[in-house]
Amino acid sequence: MSTTSAPAPTASSGGVSTRDLLRTVDKRRRRTDRIMRVLVAAAFVLAMAPLVSLVWTVAANGVERLSPYFLSHSMRGVFGGMDAGGIYHAIVGTVEITLFAALISVPVGILVAVYLVEYGRGALAKAVTFFVDVMTGIPSIVAGLFAYALFAVLMGPGVKMGAVGSVALSVLMIPVVVRSCEEMLRLVPDELREAALALGVPRWLMVVKVVLRTAVAGIGTGVMIAIARVIGETAPLLITVGVIDSINYNLFEGRMMTLPVYVYRQYSQGLAPCNDASVACIPDVAYLRAWAAALVLILIVMLLNLAGRLITRMFAPKLAR
Amino acid sequence: MTGARKGLLSPRGLRRARTTDRGASRAFRWTATASAVLILVVLAAVALFLVLRAWPAIQADPAELSAKIAWFPADTSLLGFIGPLAFGTALVAALSLAMAAPVAVGIALFISHYAPRRLANALGYAVDLLAAIPSVVYGLWGVIVLAPWLAPAWTWLSDNLGWIPLFSGPASQPPRVILTVAVVLAVMILPIITAVVREVFLQTPRLNEEAALALGATRWEMIRTAVLPFARSGIASASMLGLGRALGETMAVLMILSPGTLYSLKLLVAGQQQTIAANIAAQFPEANPLGVSTLIATGLALFVITLAVNMTARAIVARGAQKGR
């Protein structure tokens, strides 16, 4: 940040008078400078306020119901204000659907990045670069509608299963993987490629064993950040996978629950009526469950981001030099 | 970037030296190219399948639509149904952008030109964190924590500035109104705008900044004369990206807004507007086949709108990049 501080005048011949001259900015300008500095700092505080408030509320409210029981039970047979129920089925669904989405997106994403960096020139490469960017902007609900429409045409209308959600998520995930992998592959120095080719290595082996091998840490980071990006998607899963209260391990049959949808579902159930005093009943149990599930979701997202960052930090200096 | 690699590694050199592009190498190149083409195919497929499934609704008679779909308003065509939804979508996106863009530019300036580097790194991470939080959590926070906070402010607005049509009251309680949604969406799109703008700010030619300072400019004058003009196209494209995100946001709107289907500018009254995305999420699970088609038709409209916005953003970026070189 050395650019931001004005160089102090060296006191030579002019000495004190030059310095005075430089110091006396006229008042109006100095006031504007001050005001803008305050405004810029205020913008920052303004943006941090929601973050702090959000993280604090989720942590404070979520801790209340978070327990091993909550993590290891489903919502089967839970009704009203019952002091029971958990998110095991949602965790199963989230993990399976997201991993299947990654299984689709990661190979495609890496291959597209390889194409763009190693082979792509001309109109096709330009078009692909442009449309990958455009694809980043597809609203998640439209991705969900696409997956629904695709499977409705292929398998008849009204199909609800985990795999449809995975397809929707991979539409959102592929551009993120492509972008980050492309960046990483471009960091691989050309000398490595030339050395490999000079030794007579076939080009595809050069790409696989040298380029991808060198960039593997960066690719890992990119994949993790891409997973973190889609693991919290709610809308596409709401309309393609639906909701269910019991555990479903099968990605290819029947509805599944996912964490974000679980949060929404619990929230929309609202307060439970507690008319009978003899039965143990917590009126706002659904809200508490929603907060606890949100806390778990945020923790997962942050762990993924953190892991991604750690990998970058561990490997980046070697690549940069 | 592409200019750095020449000779042996360029495809032109490759094509001349046929010997290196045989067998497995050729198969690999084709696989990679096929994946690249797949991107284009997927985008085309998105449009194609949406049109395919929306077709029954598009060619259906308006009377049939309102007869078979419970929530479809009577005496309106499909376009007449999409119209208010598109209006609500644009309104909430524009509001959130108007709130987020100035703040985002401020934060980006703070990170790039005011804060000490160590602090700037930490703050950059905090802003990235904002981007990573799932939208459903924003929705939950917005409706349970933020809305009660904002309630007195909205009441004050409608009491004191009610003569402006936008703020005409009475302000609804609880404030499940479009202005609350706009605040939440502004928080959500803030990190996207900030990230892009910060990148651009950091690319300002160092010499320009130093020249401005050497001429006796204060820090703000330096920013105004050297940084902001340089970053103008970057700020514009970042705003468009944020706008694109706000247009497509579903969960926060669905959870906070109390919907209505009017062309209404009343920001503080509940039951006035609704967005396309939230309407799809709300109606889809219980819609009959024709209802699903109608919803997919609205989704198609949303797709076209966001596509246009994003393409504009990218076009601005591309033009800015050419000028910079």
Image (spheres, coloured by chain):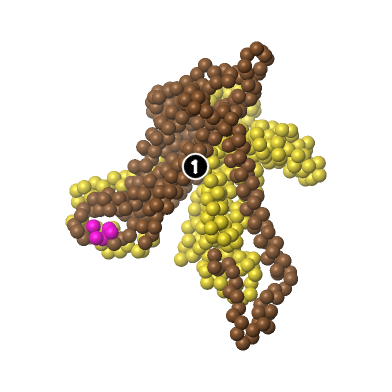
In the picture, which chain is brown? A
Quarter holding residue B49: top left
Colour in which chain B is drawn = yellow
| A88 vs B243, nearest the viewer | A88
Image mark count:
1
Name the residue carrying label 1: A302
Q: Which residues are magenta?
A: A192-196
Residue occupying the point 36% across, 37% down: A103
- Callout 1 crowding tier (Cα within 10 Å): few <14, some 14–19, many ≥20: some
Q: Residue B30's x, y, as percent?
A: 27, 47
Q: Is residue B127 left or right of residue B154?
A: left
Picture layout, residue B57 above or below residue A41: above
Q: Residue A239's x, y, as percent?
A: 50, 29
Quadrant in which the N terminus of chain B appears: bottom left
Is residue B198 in sight in this rendering? no
Picture layout, residue A33 above or below residue B57: below
Residue occupying the point 58% across, 48% down: B190
Q: Is residue A199 left or right of residue A3?
A: left
Q: Is residue A258 left or right of residue A106?
A: right
The verdict on residue A266 being magenta is: no
The verdict on residue A194 being magenta is: yes
Q: Is residue B161 left or right of residue A173?
A: right
Residue occupying the point 42% across, 35% down: A98
Q: Residue B34's x, y, as percent?
A: 32, 45
> Which element carries disc 1, helix, strand or loop?
helix
Majority secondary structure of magenta residues: helix
